[in-house]
Amino acid sequence: MNEFQASTERHALLTSEVGCSEAILLSLPNSDSTLAAANCEKKQRLIDEIDQLTTRRDKYLRAAEEQYAEMAPLEALLEGDEELDANRLREVRTEYNTLKRPYDSNKHHAWILDAQITRREQLLNHETLMAGYTDSIANWKADELELNEKRDSLSTRLVQVQQQAEEDMAKARQAETDAATAYAQAVAWGDTEGEKNANTDAQKAAKNLATAIEHNRRQHLIINALEQELVIVDQHIAEAQREHIAIQRTALLLAEKVLEEQWNEKAQALMEMGAKLWAAQRLLGGEHLSLMKLVLPKEGEDFHSWNWHELADRSGQYSVLDILSL
């Protein structure tokens, strides 16, 4: 199979994968079919550009690989433990640098072309990619919402346990204090019966306090466990927020690329309309004072702006009949 045939079959496969088969187009209503055909033409152009750019990139990479094969032994000599005399070292370094300059150049060109390929692949598959991004964003936001609900529940329970622990200890201590006070008062007034009752109450309060202290110890274990769980939940919330923000940024970068292309298409359409207007004004002998102020920036890979020079150049392709066919 020759290279042209392989490329043609690969284009057909890619076109079919992006929903541009002839059967699909014929099954659509006329208006939808026209839009779909234009969309398919745009996708086919992207596929062709990807193929051309890939061929150019691979050519640079092959050249760089061949150059590195020559550089590797020299690099080993320069980085190895073998002692080289000054003349030999200078000779090796000169030969290495001679090869490295075109090697770096080829790698740089390949890197630029790879970025262009990636951009076109993203544009080609932007609908599928964006659907995946929006689903991921929704999932991470749902996870964050669920984790925040868990955090609220844990925080509420933590406050309840802390308050209960403090109240139980305060009551136990107060009961022991009250029993001791009653005992002291009974002794002071010579109330033998009251002294016996107060002593019994004091012993009972002491036992209750010991029980409360043990219960308080267990409650603090629960408090510590709740606090640790809160730390873990906070970590998961932070992770969900990071992932959400990262995916959102990736989605925004993709949206930026798509919007740049849409802007360029609209700008081109506006330039064509402006060129017709320029041609009409020229044929009428008028001036182009307003149109000469036109500056439309091109977005994306090129730092370029369309201005009145392009309008003047394009206007030459329009005849009177072209202008009259509004």
Image (cartoon, grey):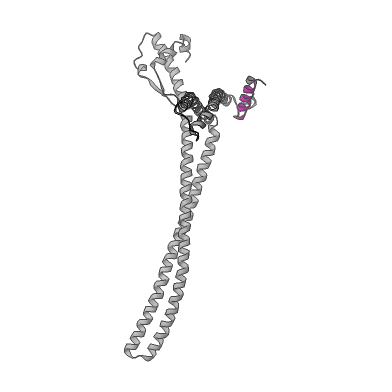
Q: Residue furthest right?
A: 1
Where in the figure is residue 38, as x and y percent of width and height?
55, 23
**Residue that appears at 63% across and 19% down:** 4
Residue 46 at least partly seen: no
Q: Which residues are magenta?
A: 5-17
| Count of marks overlaid on the render | 0
Could you tell me what secondary structure mostly forms the magenta stretch? helix
| Front-lying residue, 19 or 92 | 92
Q: Residue furthest left?
A: 188
Quadrant where the N terminus sits is top right
Q: Residue furthest front?
A: 85
State yes or no: residue 99 in magenta.
no
- Quadrant of residue 275 within the rendered picture: top left
The answer to whether 254 appears left or right of 283 in the picture is: right
| Front-lying residue, 271 or 67 | 67
**Residue that appears at 48% across and 64% down:** 222
| Front-lying residue, 192 or 303 | 303
**Residue that appears at 47% across and 51% down:** 235
**Residue that appears at 47% across and 23% down:** 98
Where in the figure is residue 187, as x and y percent of width and height?
34, 88
Where in the figure is residue 80, as x and y percent of width and height?
50, 34
Instruction: Answer above or below: position of 194 versus 61.
Output: below
